[in-house]
Image: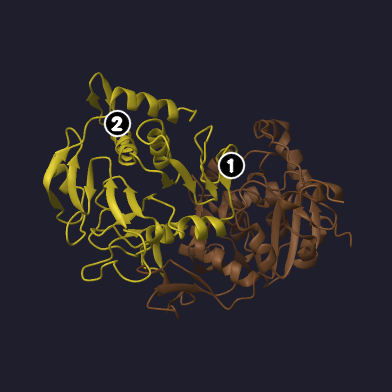
Chain colours: A brown, B yellow
Amino acid sequence: MEDKRVSLKEAIAAYVHDDLSVAIEGFTAFICFAAGQEIIRQRRRNLTLIRMTPDVIYDQMVAAGVARKLIFSYLGNPGVGPLHCLRRAIEKGIPRPLEIEEYSHYGMVGRYLAGASHLPFFPLRSYIGSDMPRVNEQIKLVQSPYGDDVVAVVPPLNPDVAILHAQRADRFGNTHLWGLLGVQKEVAFAANKVIMVVEEIVDESVIHSDPNRTLIPGLIVDAVVYVPYGAHPSYVQGYYDRDNLFYLEWDELSRDHERVQAWLNEWVYDLEDHAAYVRKLGNETRERIRPGTAPAARIDYGAYR
Amino acid sequence: MTELHPSNTEVYSPLEIMVVAAARALAGVRTVFVGVGSPNLACNLARLTVAPNLELIYESGVYGAQPARQPLSIGDPTLVTGATSVVSMADLFGLYLQGGLVEVALLGGAQIDRYGNLNTTIIGNYVDPKVRLPGSGGACEIAINAQRVYIIMHLKKRAFVEKLDFITSPGHLRENTSRQKPGIPGKGPQLVITDKALFDFANAEQEMQLVSLYPGVTREAISEKMGWKVRVATTLIETHAPTIEELAIMRKLSSGGS
């Protein structure tokens, strides 16, 4: 197999081009802020950004002007309040107008599932009685072919590029992930290109010692990128905590477009890469988000020779 | 937390009696779909009082969470550590929620109408909104699939409205359009828990009706805060004030541990 290790700069330059659709997924956990910020740094334009929960990372990317369109299901700063930059873009067209295409969570999950398994649609029990199908004609209600039941259907979604974060992978991209699994597996299988960003590159033997934990096989991974703390201020289960303080501070800072631009200059444009960002965060922040330990009980797969 | 009322020797805030009322409503319940904030607090209080077997389900993919701290978001890592099971969102929505395993779901919204329909999408016009709200998240399918829906909202005139700007999550829909039709398995909203009173939908029209007033709250105080002339249940009762024990557990929970 091919060694797929590259730097984040190389991976973004190779796969994320203007006008493409990009899904940086991760439900509260595993959100690859490092990749989003590298996309800002490389000044991509006209991207269609896809995420169930746009979170602060897409708030930053939209404020930086990289996006033309957003496909999503929940537009909030989780547990804190609204995403101010996204609201400015949608309500006032600042810094540029943003087209939106909106689903519910299960609708987005279903779109990834249909995309991953090459089905023309995914059926789900949702949307009946809601105004959502009225404003998004992609959502349809259909009669069951087996009786008088009615279900909603959503079309497949195959992002041009998925960027996912996880605890560890080998150099071929076989990836171990634990914690909130979100839609990491589904979007990886749905996307045309997959950039896998991890906290640790491990030997193949580590991956093979626990195959149930391999959510994403190297078969569908195009680039493997080592970026410690690459999800900050989101988190990686067992590696570091969510930086809730950052999310609360962003709520204040992001109310003002100029302050956001100053933040982007200080924390993105003026820094060489994510390693510089982590140095700038400093020991104090890294200590603050260091979790205690809670190891799983050992299991034995057995040897069968 | 402006007005404070006495409970025997303790005083409590409108928010506190709302949380206590929500916890009591979960008596004997086995599975609850929960969000952060006061619903999370209510579920943890219920687990320590009236519903010892209550399993907390979060849309982030967690079944049987045992949070060691109050989570800021529904994706907090404390929900994962020590949980019974952590699954993909495809499994959570497909097998747990759509599979009918969620007994009660707690929902809220920016606007609610008399049939318990909820708006969390926009204020104003969809294409050119006055205020863009978060949208559905999982709320639309939760409202449709949970066996029962309990709504937790502060009673305010701009929230309890005659007509929603947008229906995100269906309640009992609208006059002459009952939810008893194919494709909606759940029974919909059964209870609205506010900071002033409780409402249910126990009438033929499944219209929200005032069923229980919190101590010291008048019927006039309720109608002042609603955008329509609210129906009143045949028997209107008064909610018991929070007990000293309920308040003590809740305050310990909200100040840290679980």
Q: Of helix, strand and loop, which one carries label 2?
A: loop
Q: Is residue A267 left or right of residue B230?
A: right
Where B243 sits versus A129, above or below? above
Q: Is residue B142 left or right of residue A75?
A: left
Where B216 sits versus A141, above or below? above
Q: Is residue B74 left or right of residue B133?
A: right
The front one of A86 and B61 is B61
- Which amino acid type is shown beneath numbered disc 1? Val
The residue that mark 2 highlights is B13
The spot of residue A170 in percent (x, y) is 83, 52
The spot of residue A11 in percent (x, y) is 80, 61
In the rendered image, the residue lying farthest to the top is B9
The spot of residue B226 in percent (x, y) is 20, 51
Mark 1 → mark 2, Cα distance in angstroms? 31 Å
The residue that mark 1 highlights is B80
- Seen at 76% across and 54% down, the residue is A175
Residue B181 in view, yes or no: yes
